[in-house]
Image (tube, coloured by chain):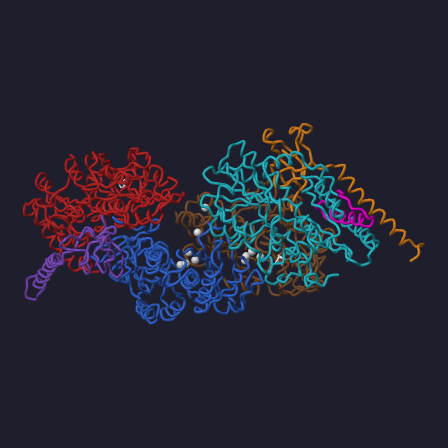
Chain colours: A orange, B purple, C blue, D brown, E red, F cyan
Amino acid sequence: MCLGIPGRIVRIDDVDRKLATVDVAGVKRQINIACIVNEAHPVEHCVGAWVLVHVGFAMARIDEREAALTLQILQELGEAQAELEAIASSPGSSP
Amino acid sequence: MCLGIPGRIVRIDDVDRKLATVDVAGVKRQINIACIVNEAHPVEHCVGAWVLVHVGFAMARIDEREAALTLQILQELGEAQAELEAIASSPGSSP
Amino acid sequence: MKDLIDDVFVAAFDNSDLAPMEDQARLDLGMLAAAGDRLAFTTDAVVVDPLFFPGGDIGKLAVCGTINDLAVGGAIPLYLSCAAIIEEGTSVELLRKVAQSMAHSAQLAGVRIVTGDTKVVPRGACDKLFITASGLGVIPKGVQLNAHAARPGDVVLVNGLLGEHGAAILAARGEMALDCTIESDCAPLHELVAALLARAPGVRCLRDATRGGIATVLNEIAQASHVGIEIDEAQCPMREQVRGFCEILGLDPLYLANEGKLVAIVAPEDADAALTALQAHPLGAEARIVGRVTELEPGRVVMRTLLGGHRIVDMLVGEQLPRIC
Amino acid sequence: MKDLIDDVFVAAFDNSDLAPMEDQARLDLGMLAAAGDRLAFTTDAVVVDPLFFPGGDIGKLAVCGTINDLAVGGAIPLYLSCAAIIEEGTSVELLRKVAQSMAHSAQLAGVRIVTGDTKVVPRGACDKLFITASGLGVIPKGVQLNAHAARPGDVVLVNGLLGEHGAAILAARGEMALDCTIESDCAPLHELVAALLARAPGVRCLRDATRGGIATVLNEIAQASHVGIEIDEAQCPMREQVRGFCEILGLDPLYLANEGKLVAIVAPEDADAALTALQAHPLGAEARIVGRVTELEPGRVVMRTLLGGHRIVDMLVGEQLPRIC
Amino acid sequence: MKYVDEFRDRDKAAALATEIEKLACSIEGGSTPIHIMEVCGGHTHSIFRYGVEELLPARIELIHGPGCPVCVLPMGRVDDCVAIAEQPNVIFTTFGDAMRVPGSRKSLMQARAEGADVRMVYSPMDALALARAHPDREVVFFGLGFETTMPATALTILQADREAIDNFTVFCNHITIIPTIKAILDSPDVRIDAFLGPGHVSMVIGSAPYDFIARHYRRPLVIAGFEPLDVLQSIWMVLKQIKEGRCEIENQYARVAAAGGNVAALQAIARVYELRPFFEWRGLGSIDHSGVRLRPEYARFDAERRYAIPNARIADPKACQCGEVLKGVLKPWQCKVFGTSCTPQTPAGALMVSSEGACAAYYQYSSAKQRTGARG
Amino acid sequence: MKYVDEFRDRDKAAALATEIEKLACSIEGGSTPIHIMEVCGGHTHSIFRYGVEELLPARIELIHGPGCPVCVLPMGRVDDCVAIAEQPNVIFTTFGDAMRVPGSRKSLMQARAEGADVRMVYSPMDALALARAHPDREVVFFGLGFETTMPATALTILQADREAIDNFTVFCNHITIIPTIKAILDSPDVRIDAFLGPGHVSMVIGSAPYDFIARHYRRPLVIAGFEPLDVLQSIWMVLKQIKEGRCEIENQYARVAAAGGNVAALQAIARVYELRPFFEWRGLGSIDHSGVRLRPEYARFDAERRYAIPNARIADPKACQCGEVLKGVLKPWQCKVFGTSCTPQTPAGALMVSSEGACAAYYQYSSAKQRTGARG
Ligand code: SF4
Ligand code: SF4
Ligand SMILES: [Mg+2]
Ligand SMILES: [Mg+2]
Ligand SMILES: [Mg+2]
Ligand SMILES: [Mg+2]
Ligand SMILES: [Mg+2]
Ligand SMILES: [Mg+2]
Ligand SMILES: [Mg+2]
Ligand SMILES: [Mg+2]
Ligand SMILES: [Mg+2]
Ligand SMILES: [Mg+2]
């Protein structure tokens, strides 16, 4: 449930009503950003932010560092395997 | 103005509301006959009557005798002319 | 829904040339070229309301109308296409009835429905069902029928009683609450045309007198041929109920649509042969010579009235409306 | 009104084969038979909403769609009919634009609109304008393209980026308030097809991937040929915006309509030639081999997913709806 | 069709034509034209539909009078109809005749094309039936016509009253012909020697209301039926009066129009309507006491009171000469714009709209010879 | 697409699959299946769309949970939607997902085909915009979804309140997943070893609400993202917990779902909704405190109060075994009517309606092999 798609805020449309335009792969749509603004993150400073969009609302900011961490784990898994495979298939290894 | 067409009443549909069905060359339609009924001509006795229909109302009974008189005049005119022509074109007449 | 609807039509039309798996029918050109030297191609969008009416339905109308547009060019009608635009929510039962009527009409007429399309549009985006039929036929070598071929002295024939389709449709709509037994004359005329052409080579031009009635067709011919046409009101065959219907609503029956009537312009020497040929066919039993082509007032149709006077029978401006004055 | 509208179309289509005075076009059969041995005949009802959209309009769509249904049979498209159903009150200016677009598209494609019909229906009885176009073409001798001709081992090609028409139309309707620059791919494919057939005689089957997208077309071929088809998600060419559009609305781009894309099933030995031929044409620059025909699960289309797993690509049930879960 | 076909007979017409020819020759004054006005559009229609004029001697000139309620409808009234029809919840019902009459911005036909719910009915009863069938909608009936049609509208209102139907109103534009005939006879340029009287009006009002025409204005009048033989016979009767120096009200249409009219119909008229102080006629201007409206007792059925209508007086187009044609001063084809900027497709004046309008009739039914004005 | 494409990578998937395979082999119990329930329909969709199961060892069996708000919508609620949509002046707005869900008589799609004004929207804000644009109509929004969607509806109601829009109401069918997970864990025939937690619900509510699953029910749970690598990685994390004997709430989806959830969203939820005493779930029956309704302060935006709705409890079809499938007791293809009387064209149960429904997903995306039940 709850189709969500990452998008980047490219314009603030209405500061009072907390409306902004988000860009998803070049497709734009006006969304409500009330859930991702607060005193630390005022509406005006949202341009450029990556958010998770659900039914026309930004429901979360996407944490770039966390995303990178997740990918890094996957990367390392892959590399570890590649090494193992390389060893397994190297001429000198036992069958 | 005032397209009127002769038709014959073939059925009484509603005595109270004075509605009847009229037949015009086999085409039937419900009409209002309030204007052609009175104590002398109650609704119930209208079947068979020829009436002049205008916008869904019977606006007059058609007087068969008067119609015949009119046609008779035309008929006589025609016959009188035919006689004259016959005389004019008869071999013995002057050219 | 969509698949179901496709099935309804495909199932009804089932024949060897209908290839529902392909995007196009493929017809043997050698066979066609053997039958004649020209291919006739026509299309008609049918939007009749109501869909079912005395004497026919939208399906029969689409098939017959397209056959007739081929036939009046002298073509032997062979193949039809059928494109249906359907309002969401229209019952499959209704569609099945229409599809079967099309299939039946086509079969009776010896033509095949070989390709088609169906589109369902949202509720309110169309009025239940529209059908567009296109038709292919072959014109035998030597047959030359042209709207511009009428010559002064030619006679004008019709193959039967006029105005029945138009009156039947108006009556079936029920808006004027008129009750009658008028039926649409909807019929395929290609066999009648074949019989006519076989016996009367002097046929110059044929035209089915659909929307706008014979008045419109005669005007089109008069203009295309730069001739005058004079018809005689007393010779225009009409059912008594159609006359009554028109008198009540103030309509002119010459402008009422026909769907099984044609106008034939025939060289004078073949007039009798043409009349005989028409009358010998069931769809021409009431055929009549209704007028002749003249040199007077080229482009204009004149009618000798019942009274013996004359009036112009002009092109219809807009559609005829019922009137009370 | 009616006459005015007839004039709009007749004036726009003006060409020597269009005989507005006759009920049918008459086409030389000798010339047709010289070009091939089969006549291709097809029809499409076009009901697109909105009438004008990025990359095209209903008129261009009608012309291209009908040309494409001829082209994928291997036919050289030659003649079109045009039947327009028009809502009372639709502006003549709009109709003129559509008619001119049809005429322009036909001219560019080298086909002629030779017969037509227009019907005006009361306000509310249709949604502005529907166009049904039928088409005639000639299939050259020896060309044999059939939906049932796919064989295991054949390759599956498409001529370019998928899903653009469907996405452009959905976006143009504005209901989902998505703003993008996706344009319909609406284009006539007959020249591309001619180029393909000239270089790759091993083409077994072509199909334009319109309503229902390539998913539907592949299923039709798999069923008609009793073969399995496996495509590779990673090879399906798609514009980034189309992918984004689909992600936002939860749509599957494989089911989005195309109006300038075809699926080609080609014998393995001609796969490279086919790809080269397609890529050499402007409408095939993004052509790609997207899959192959298999012996497994006849009648079924399977996709190797981006992840390396597989899923079935079934026939679409009803139309795709935007979703949030 | 009984009472119809007998009156369309070609042979009888020929005989009548011969008699008329003879009579016309025998009337003193040599070749001076004899001008006969058929007041009623129904006669105009019949004359053109059957080519009656062709059977008449050159000396007889028919003048096509103002007796078509559609033709004399001023543009402002059409605008009012459109304004009512465009109210959100209204079903506007009308006879087909009024659909194409141009208003200053659009006709009812155009309003319908733009989305207004305008429906054609055959009878005011059908409009009332629509009101019964759609209690959530407001049904307005466009009451149009002379005395012939007035009773139908009146009886429909009385029926609505009996059934207490509250979503039915009438936009009353009924008019009466008598003051208009008087106005024409009073105009200085009038050229009318005799009248054919409107048979269906007389069917309702009888013949007495025309007495002043014979008595004060010394013009013969024959109440005429609508079949072509009726018209020919009435012309013949008129000529006999002229020949014999009589000025009387005679009745050719006695089979339908009784001398006393129709009592029930007159009662319904009296009960429902009252005279307006004046009413605007297209081409003729304002004429006193020439229209009726609903009495206050039936105010709740009065669309004029229920809807805010513009009620603007729109001047006839400058080039339009309908007034002169209606008075018999000009023949239709003598109008500056006849056949050029005024055609049935693009009517400038009302006489080009209805098939009863003299200009439309000439345009549609007359030969090119007549159109160019070269008439025998 | 950033944050999307990286998580659909074929090579990384292969590497993960190998690790999962190794882990699964190394977990004690030999070939006993390891049952992992993905609670959320979004995961189910992703699993089928990308063929994730094919990459998993035979020992791992995924159980597709009740986390699709469309699938668990009872028939009676669809009937209520239809009843509201068929009110004369209503524009009924809904996410496309709900259009085809069968009610006892018809779906919203069928109601629309029969003339009801039903419109699909992408956002509740769009429904509110419709209300602004059509002040003469009544716009009803069908509020559907778990905690992820609740804030959007709540914020829209708050906006309507600020603007004093009086033709906008919400038919609130929002539900909450926690009591339902608990109900499933309490059922005697449950066979679930671990959970993938719904990442987008956690984006709103954080991770704390799941603590009881680890603490009381001793099942590991990994909050998972929705891209296929997210799902695979979460399965790998779950297996690691099992292998290591841990029962924890872990978060694979930290890039989106913060531990504390979204404060603003939770505030909006708290302000607008209150828990219902119970709510009916299709296939699962009534579950206490599993749904929310509008607080009395927002009663004027509550469609349940504005419209007379049937509110009938319609029993699931007898043959329907959605409940068993939802609990993981049956695989979809083991249902008596799967693929015969229950297909996506003619869904008997809700799991066949939405593409997130486990049965529809099996029907559409799985190979014939799986359908016949002969699964490895
Ligand atoms: S031609 Fe037109 S403007 Fe002139 S009198 Fe006739 S209707 Fe009036
Ligand atoms: S097959 Fe149908 S009835 Fe059976 S569990 Fe699935 S959705 Fe429910
Ligand atoms: Mg045609
Ligand atoms: Mg035709
Ligand atoms: Mg024709
Ligand atoms: Mg098609
Ligand atoms: Mg409809
Ligand atoms: Mg086609
Ligand atoms: Mg097509
Ligand atoms: Mg195609
Ligand atoms: Mg036509
Ligand atoms: Mg519309």
Please provide percent x and percent y for residue E358.
24, 45
Residue E241 versus residue F162 in the image, above or below? below
Viewer-closest of E53 and C13: C13
On the picture, is A65 further left or further right than E7? Answer: right
Please provide percent x and percent y for residue D197.
65, 59
Identify the residue at horizontal 20%, vertical 34% (top origin): E277
Residue F123 versus residue B64 in the image, above or below? above
Please provide percent x and percent y for residue C260.
37, 63
Magenta stretch containing residue E90, yes or no?
no
To which quarter of the image does residue B27 belong?
bottom left
Viewer-closest of E146 and A3: A3
Can residue E53 be seen?
no
Can residue E318 be seen?
yes
Please provide percent x and percent y for residue F299.
52, 37
To which quarter of the image does residue C149 belong?
bottom left
Magenta stretch containing residue F244, yes or no?
yes
On the picture, is E126 further left or further right than F148? Answer: left
Residue D310 versus residue E168 in the image, above or below? below
Identify the residue at horizontal 32%, vertical 51% (top origin): C320
On the picture, is D308 further left or further right than D20? Answer: right
Number of marks in the image?
Answer: 0
State the extent of the magenta-drawn residues as a range: F224-251
